[in-house]
Amino acid sequence: MSGHSNKAIYGAIIANSAIAVSKFIAAFFTGSSSMLSEGIHSLIDTGNGALLLFGIKRSHRPPDKLHPFGYGNEIYFWSFIVAVLIFALGGGIALYEGIQHILHPKELKHVEWNYVVLIAAIIFEGASLRIALKEFSKTRGNKSFYQELVDTKDSSTAAVVIEDTAALMGLVIALTSVFLGHITGIVYFDGAGSILIGLLLIGVSFFFAVECKSLLIGEGLMEDDVKKVTKILAANKNVTAYKRPLSLYFGPKEVLVNLDVDFEDGLTADKLEETIDVIEHEIKTQIPSVNRIFIEAERIKTNKNFKETLKDE
């Protein structure tokens, strides 16, 4: 995915704020550990949405002397913070609450509160997830959902999709644990549900943190995009050889591409400039996220069949 959309984030913030309030009210009247964990989860998701909006705003700052390539990576940093918060606060508190309620179980009261709130929350969370998935799928193409989630460079929208999916799964776990505790009378189901929610959040957090880490330490174009660049170079009659393109993401829509190219001997300055303009235009047309291209002309040792071999790849 090449860009981010605030629409999905605003939708998630509105839904999570309303859901968090209703969950805390239900937890107060019923004493449910699962409901309290879910309320904390929704509250954290609301805060995470605000952090993502803050990160997006900061990532749009223009380049300056200290940051000549701009601040696009800010969104990756704040997405990583969101992943840590899901782990430390969401997962940790849910685990703690679950263990405490297993060690000191309490019988649930006014269970109907839980049913009403959880069913309503599933509806609202499902609507929020639908908006996020719609934004996420705009550039997914033929990739599977999981593959796009791994490949995407739009960490803000991915964060909303991941959070909303985890929230919906957590609601189902909470509803199931409340229902089982209600019909069986076994008080341990509530605490067990909270523990499962905690484990779910920790797993989601770990997955998202790994994805953000890859972007933070410097990730380049996917192999399919690298092949597009090499095909453009191989097809240009004024290019005799080149090295593998080097690229780096500075944000979802900000990619730097460095090229070492050997041009035909005898090209005039005007012809060389024209060739470089053509190469840059074709790359930016085929890969819209590329916004900076540096081309260095140099001698590259190769054989006469170099370009023909690359064309056949």
Image (cartoon, rainbow, N blue to C red):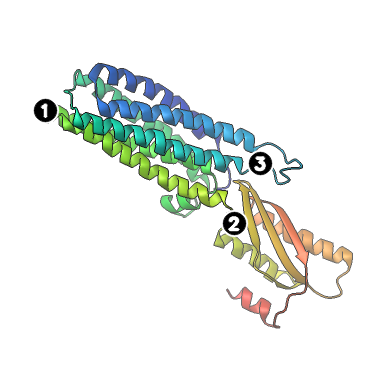
Numbered disc 3: secondary structure: loop
Say above or below: 159 vs 24: below
* Three-letter amino acid code of the residue under disc 1: Gly
Q: Is residue 248 above or below residue 209?
A: below
Residue that mark 3 sits on: 71
At 11% from the left and 30% from the top, the residue drawn is 184
Residue 10, position as x, y percentages in the image: 51, 29
- Quadrant assignment for the C terminus: bottom right
Q: Quadrant of residue 272?
A: bottom right
Dot 2: what SS?
loop
How far apart are the two marked residues, 2 and 3, measured between alpha carbons? Answer: 17 Å
Mark 1 nearby-residue class (10 Å; few <14, some 14–19, many ≥20): few
Q: Residue at x 77, y 64 (%)?
A: 296
Contact, mark 1 vs mark 3 (Cβ under 8 Å): no
Q: Horizontal and vertical percent for residue 100?
A: 24, 30
Residue projecting furthest to the bottom: 304
Task: Describe the element under mark 1 as helix, strand or loop.
Answer: loop
Distance from Cα at disc 1 to Cα at disc 3: 55 Å
Q: Mark 1 or mark 3, which has the lower sequence index?
A: 3
**Of residues 212 and 7, which is closer to you in this image?**
212
The reply to whether the C-beta atoms of the residues labelled 2 and 3 are less than 8 Å apart is: no
According to the image, label 2 marks what residue?
220
Marking on residue 197: none
Residue closest to the far left: 184
Decide: few, some or many residues near mark 3? Use Cα within 10 Å; few <14, some 14-19, many ≥20: many
The disc placed on residue 185 is 1
* Residue at screen point 46% across, 25% down: 14
